[in-house]
Amino acid sequence: MTLASDEEVRELKFRDPAQGKALAERLERLTGEIGRAPVAVMHVCGSHEQAIARFGLRHILPRALEVIMGPGCPVCITDVPEVDEGVALAQQGVRLATYGDMLKVPGSAGSLADARAAGARVDVVYSVSQAVELARELDEELVFFATGFETTAVATAAEILRGPPPNFSVLSAHKYIPPVMEIVAEMPETRVEGFLAAGHAATITGWGVFEPFVARHRLPVVVAGFEPLDILAGLVRLVELIRAGTPAVDNMYPRCVTREGNLAAQAQLWRVFRPLGGRWRGIAHVPNGNLRLTDEWAHLDARRRFRIDVSRLWDFAPAALVQRCLCGEIMAGLKSPTDCPLFGRECQPEAPVGACMVSSEGTCRIWHTYGGHPELRTAGEVRP
Amino acid sequence: MCLGVPGRVLVVEGLSATVDFWGVKKQVRLDVVDAPVTPGDYVLNHVGFAIRRIPAEEGAATLQLYQELLQKQNEADLMATDVRSELQAAGPGWWRPCDPRF
Amino acid sequence: MKAQLPIGERITLKHGAGGRAMRALIEQVFLDGAETPSGGIGLAAMDDGAALRVGDRWLVLTTDSHVIHPLFFPGGDIGRLSVSGTVNDLAMMGATEVLALTCSVIVEDGFPAAQLEAVQASIRATSREAAAPIVTGDTKVMGRGELDGLVLNTAGVAFTDRVVPDSGLRPGDRILVTGTLADHGFAVLAARHKLDLQGELRSDVAPINSLVREALAAGGADVVAMKDPTRGGLASALHEMAEKSGVGVVLEERRIPLTGPVRAAAELLGIDPLHVANEGKAVLGVRPDAVNRVLEALRAHPLGREAAVVGTCITEHRGRIILDTGLGRRLLTEPEGEPLPRIC
């Protein structure tokens, strides 16, 4: 009933406590050798933060190492104007399908969940394929409100290339991660000395995409997977590079990531989508950060199929609470959830103020779900 | 759901595979996988699509990777002393090679 | 420690989810003005049932409504669930010999008679299994569209010499679970949504009064707290127990028994099994000296083969559950809103 370690390895789960302890000790040694604190590194993936939180890894990381979550939650960075497009469309009577996380993200005048409570039709799906199947069963239009980074955009592209039914269209709010690392590296206030890159996005794009970044910013980038040992090993390698002063890309997830990446997926992705500059919530302009449908797919582009009228939503001034929300700075890795006066009080998962609390990959939501970082090292001994 | 979960391929039918996740099975699409897939292969599943065929020997290779990191401990102990003296000799600017202000 | 959440203008699905929102609702709406029976355990204790002093014994009383959807799922149905749920609530208070049950039915106009007969057959079979006779009930039919199919309500009554609270834990006590967790919730989720997951996800729904009887016979007064981890899973149940007892709990994640299918479904869906409902399991708090006896007694019973010791109570971090993952530690929080609606 409880897995033995070699069983786990056969299932490609890397969670052995003894190896974890050894890697953590190595990390402690390396960080100590750098000789100053804190050493700050950033990851840009909600799934990395979830894995760190779920396995309680912060409990064993060196105190001198700060692992900051950057703008890696695709739902959280979906900006107000994009949410408004979805809300306006739903209020105009068009049926929407979207991933569950998008439901409660606040726009100018409420979220998709609010629109649904007031009578709009919004279906929650677990995959784009499910949305396409739903469209086949319906007589009316169905718009898939597509969120997620390039890894998820690949699935949307595949379904578009497969040929969805004529009543199906896509409102793309997909995002592309590499450009935002540039933005964070260029922020004057940043203390980040290295990046842990998202392993599954890199499975698609290849680790080669980080070489120009490293050349430009002289910061090491290590690609890491999502098993807890993958993350610890990735951090060990990153701190090694920082200590040695070596700006380089290193791949610590070779079972999934290669230098060129998944060429078949890339071909499909860039046939269907093109990158466009746009605003990310809290981060201002990210050149090439948004993915939009190319002209070849105009007939499936909800922005071109429908006239989306967001102007009537702009009459609503942002709530006073929203102005105190620190999501932007949290997503840029400049502040942490506990710095926000609303965290855990006026802003909770049941009553979120900012996007970071809405999505299962949002920093604030993850911290709240896994209890934040209380000091657990001194808790009572566990007896055998 | 941005989770990427590995599973083992049981059956392949055109662009669709039945994948075993050691307890439940699921249909996974092969439209975007990076290599031809056959029963017995591992694949990485993301929102119902296989985005990577993971070669079978990669489980052991991953363990090997962790081991290499840990074995470096001894070599690193020796090297650390050398590196520190070099850096000190080069002057204070070298202490923060990754600081973007320099 | 009261939940801080305001109720809001309207009751929503999250208020029935078994988590913090539901506790807030009960505390702020239902407990207001509730009386405690003299010398007994009443509504304010928010235990699995009420206990009333009758002579030198306790009469334990409990009631449950069942709205689960779908009505039939792998491993069980609404009928089996309604009988088991009430029998188990009584057992959690220490009352394992059920005196009697009631069963009331509200049916929607147009509901297939064959399905109602199947549900009734299941109710009768489960009642026999638990040796819990159904002595009275009620039947109502509502108009089409006024009710979703079928709703059942059961009430149960039993005597016991000792009431086992859910609040008797002390630092050093061990936490036991009687078997694999999250079976029911995942079975219902898979049956309800088009998740395209093929696998042996079966509900564990069963009356466990005979299992609990064995544990109490072996451990006696050293079984100091009991609760069944229904909606909200082990996390919810342990939170209540820890808060009411004034202790912290350290749980060892790698000791928690899970079936292969549940483990796999949890990874694929990103749902924590510790937040997911069980309908044939119990969580026990046991004094350290009695743990081996109780564990042996549980494992000797067909419904307790996978019983395991999973945690320890500590003095610090009162009301909190600390999860030791093997690699590190984190807090196990209560489930927030509604991952799985209409699970019971």
Image: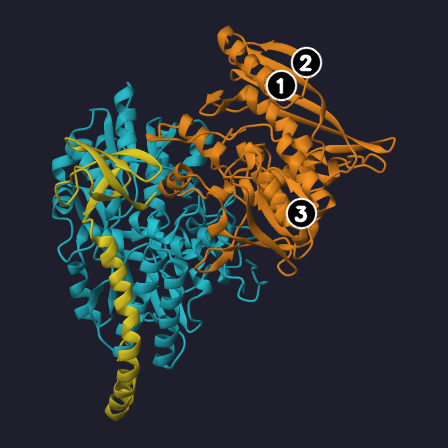
Chain colours: A cyan, B yellow, C orange
C-alpha gap between disc 2 and disc 1: 17 Å
Q: Which amino acid does label 2 sit on?
A: Gly
Q: Which residue is drawn at 67% across and 36% down?
A: C26
Residue B96, image x and y in percent?
29, 81
Question: Which mark is in front, 3 or 2?
Answer: 2
- 3 and 2 marks on the same chain: yes
Lower position in the chain sequence, tag 2 or tag 1: 1
- Determine the chain carrying the residue at label 1: C
Q: Name the residue under label 3.
A: C2
| Residue C137 marker | 2
Instruction: Give the quadrant of residue A154.
Output: top left
Few, some or many C-alpha atoms within 10 Å of disc 2 (few <14, some 14-19, many ≥20)? few
Q: What element carries label 1?
A: helix
Is residue C3 visible to us here? Answer: no
Q: Residue A146 has which mark?
A: none
Q: Marks 1 and 2: in contact by CB < 8 Å? A: no
CA separation in Å, label 1 and label 3: 40 Å
Q: Mark 2 lies on which chain?
A: C
Whole-angstrom CA distance, mark 3 to mark 2, is: 36 Å
Nearest to the eye among marks 1 and 3: give it.
1
Marks 2 & 1 on one chain: yes
The C terminus of chain A - image quarter: bottom right
